[in-house]
Image: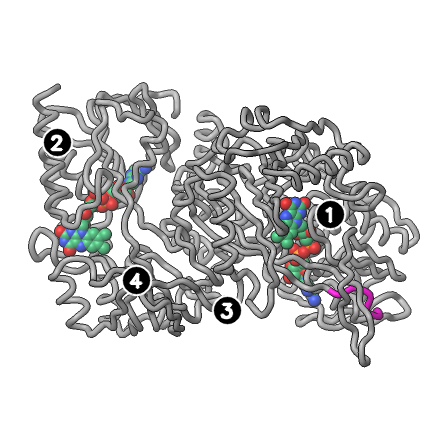
Amino acid sequence: MEHTDVAVIGAGLLGCFTARALTAFALSVTVLEAREDVCTGISRANTGIVYTGYDTKPGTLKTALCLQANRDFGRLCRELDVPFSRPGSLLFGFGPRSERVLRDKFAQGQRNGVPGLALLEPAAVYAREPHLAPGVTLGLYAPGTGTVDPWALGIAAFENARDNGADFRFCQPVLHMERTPEGFRLETAAGTYQARAVVNCAGLQAAAVRELTQCPAVRLVPSAADYLVLDDTLAGFVRHILFHEPEERGKGLTIVPTVEGALLIGPTDRPQGEAPAGAVSRQGLERLRRLCAQVVPDLPLEETIRAFAGLRPDPFAVRQEGGQWVPTDRSIHSFTVLEEEGLISLVGIKTPGLTCAAALGEHAASLAAQHLGGPGRNVAFSPERRGIRRAHALSEAERDALIQQDPAYGTVVCRCRDITLGEVREAVRRGAVTVDGVKRRTGAGMGRCQGARCMQAVAEVLAQEQNIPLRSVTKDGPGSPILLGQPGE
Amino acid sequence: MINAMEETDILVIGGGAAGLAAAESLSARRRVLLVEREERLGGVLLQCVHRGFGGEQTGPAYAAGSVARLAKTAVQVRTGTHVLSLAPDRTALLSSPRGLERVRFDRCVLATGCRERTIHALPVAGTRPAGIFTAGTVQRLLLDHGPVGERIVVLGSGDIGQIVARQLVQSGRRVVAMVEQRDRLGGLARNRRDCVETYHIPVLLRSTVDEILGEGRISGVVVRDLDTGRRRRLACDTLLTALGLVPDQDLCRGLGADLPDWLALCGNCDYVHEMVDGVVREAAALGAAWGETF
Ligand SMILES: Cc1cc2nc3c(=O)[nH]c(=O)nc-3n(C[C@H](O)[C@H](O)[C@H](O)COP(=O)(O)OP(=O)(O)OC[C@H]3O[C@@H](n4cnc5c(N)ncnc54)[C@H](O)[C@@H]3O)c2cc1C
Ligand SMILES: Cc1cc2nc3c(=O)[nH]c(=O)nc-3n(C[C@H](O)[C@H](O)[C@H](O)COP(=O)(O)OP(=O)(O)OC[C@H]3O[C@@H](n4cnc5c(N)ncnc54)[C@H](O)[C@@H]3O)c2cc1C
């Protein structure tokens, strides 16, 4: 049995930021993650938008955290050395219904104290975004909206937490939890842990994990979101993060010019049903293509390089029915953070959970610290972390100097995104154990050839650095081998 | 290293069939520098172990012939060196384990070949598990590391798809089906006979893959009949795509819409060639044309 002051369950964005915030206290922190790496759950697939806070109701925890988080985002990304851009956003529509929505959001944003909001007449909208379809009736401009690579952010928080002493244990799903006089006893697939407090950041499983010791209060019903990615040859096609407010019911279109220069289009909103996690739906893709044709008709969809899907943890209140607990139709709109005698649960944290990840992590950490009687600060704590050196982001002189230090930075592995062998090796040294783990850390395989030219080289580095046969290398964890079948026939 | 600027008359980018032939033919009158990103010269020829290049040679044998002829010229060769960018001032930026270098040139031959279209550009539903490869990736993996899977669906029926399908069957794997959207197989008659017919590879015409199944490793695909709209599942552990090639002209990006007159595209980087003979003929013609004009 291992002892720790705080056990964090789950290493998505929230688990990583909670761990980081906990290491600022003089506490031992152990993170138990079911999968082989960080950010493989909800955090794997989202829109990457840093929201300003005009979308949410005044006076809620969500709004308070979002405003604070947006203000602090530049500093956070400097501390963690994560690329961040703030192109601003433009919400627009094509008729009376959307016009009402925009005016309401503008007023709500003013009440919330979101800086710089402006309603724009059509001429001003087209001056900013000439490719929008004709007929825009109104625009709402928010200069503070930004975008960040969610993987880069989550991985940075993970590395920083680890550097500050948090102990991450992968492939350790928590299967059992019970209260003990000292706190909690947790059983994973690989060991037993005694913790004085627990922060439950289990994402889609957060309600189930909570119910290991508590009576049901919230249930999560997953819904799915489809996306398209367009090639970075289209950099500059749109200048803002675009939100389309449709006239009919249903979700409009969002277009994000990402920090890497690609265009991210989506998300749809549909029931997940029985489909496996991450499965793209035919109807979802058709809907996105149809919306694009309506809203940005000259967007060249033939530049699509990828489609993917994410999962939302939609929280619902529960009621008892024939001895069973079932979700009601009362969906919960604010963030749900429950503190129950040392068990802190973050349940159903949807948008803007990425924006607020650091703020939520600090909030959860302070609840845990309070429960433990206010421990002192960790004097050795440093909020600073340096990312992998990105050869393509350096000046020629810097890039040359880097190659002189380590010749591996001279060999380009991923040609679409200009990623070098040095970066791939460093990603593995920092904890990538799969081809997708390297992709999340370096961007290798995210360009237009989708790994056709670099996947083999990446797999070879994974084999070498971990000293395993290539046949043991996986795409994203157990059950996903790159190579199948025995050689030598 | 970045401060020293090297100079050459002609810079050839890419050491495949096109770059090798162009460099050879230009070297008679000019200083030529040939830059290739891989450690070995030959390009796509090196992964084509079947016969049929310049007659009955294999790709590597054909490449060896070209490399041997090049060795007799004064062409300077730099392998393991990637050209990062071309600039309008007639310089190129090179990256290698030795460092970053700038090369100044009078003229440049772009012979960077092509890249493969991937399934991800198509509106395909379902999951994105392990076991989805382009034909070129499979050729390289087979050479370097052995088998990639046991039950394979091939999407696309051009020469490359057919050749790799044969290679897989020859090594004891099962090709479950070759799926093609047109009403006949693509590629050369020779390949249809020697690959598909000889090895009895099942063919599904007027069909496409529109959904991928499986978590972890691919477990199957949904094939849709384009005429009836009917869908059916095919179990497989590997999906190999041969969806066509696209000339790789990425290095032209910084040069504006009209290509400068000091730049020539050659081989598959210009347009996709079915046979290496045409590639070599055009590259040699370039040498003759440029030899006269400057
Ligand atoms: C489609 C979509 C778009 C979004 N877009 C935005 C946006 O643009 N801007 C924004 O601010 N927010 C956005 N969000 C919200 C944001 O992505 C989420 O709030 C955030 O990723 C949630 O992270 P998490 O750590 O709670 O969950 P996860 O990333 O799912 O992490 C949970 C982890 O817990 C692990 N786990 C589960 N059960 C156990 C167990 N029993 N034992 C151990 N480990 C376990 C899982 O393996 C997983 O790694 C979006 C969300 C979705 C779904
Ligand atoms: C699977 C397959 C089967 C074929 N079968 C036959 C056949 O049976 N018979 C036949 O006659 N022909 C066949 N062909 C056609 C023929 O082989 C090709 O058309 C020819 O080899 C193409 O030569 P290339 O030089 O244009 O391109 P490539 O061989 O692709 O060469 C391009 C080179 O440029 C390098 N490069 C790219 N970018 C950079 C950069 N930025 N910096 C430095 N170097 C770079 C690459 O590494 C590569 O070596 C086949 C082709 C394929 C793909």
Q: CA distance from mark 4 to mark 3?
A: 21 Å
Q: Is ligand 2 within 8 Å of the beta carbon of the residue shown at mark 4?
A: no
Q: Is residue A80 left or right of residue B81?
A: right
Pair 1/2: label in front: 2
Chain ID, mark 3: A
Image point 81% across, 80% down: which residue? A323
Q: Residues within 10 Å of mark 3 (few under 14, many from 20)?
A: some
Q: Are marks 3 and 1 on the same chain?
A: yes
Query: Which color scheme is applied?
Result: one colour
Under tag 3, what secondary structure? loop
Looking at marks 2 and 4 on the same chain, the residue that comes earlier in the sequence is marked by 4
Q: CA distance from mark 2 to mark 4?
A: 35 Å
Image point 55% across, 48% down: which residue? A266
Q: Residues within 10 Å of mark 2 (few under 14, many from 20)?
A: many
Looking at marks 3 and 1 on the same chain, the residue that comes earlier in the sequence is marked by 1
Is residue A338 visible in the rendered image? The answer is yes
Q: Amino acid at mark 4?
A: Leu
Q: Which mark is residue A219?
A: none
Q: Are marks 1 and 2 on the same chain?
A: no
Q: Give, as a single range, the part of the protein colored magenta.
A: A214-219
Looking at the rendering, which quadrant does residue A59 occupy?
A: top right
Q: Which residue is mark 1?
A: A20
Q: Which residue is mark 4?
A: B142
x then y, percent, for residue A405? 47, 35
Q: Are marks 2 and 4 on the same chain?
A: yes
Q: CA distance from mark 3 to mark 1?
A: 31 Å
Looking at the rendering, which quadrant does residue A330 occupy?
A: bottom right
Q: Is ligand 1 within 8 Å of the beta carbon of the residue shown at mark 1?
A: no
Q: Which mark is residue B286?
A: 2
Under tag 2, what secondary structure? helix
Under tag 1, what secondary structure? helix
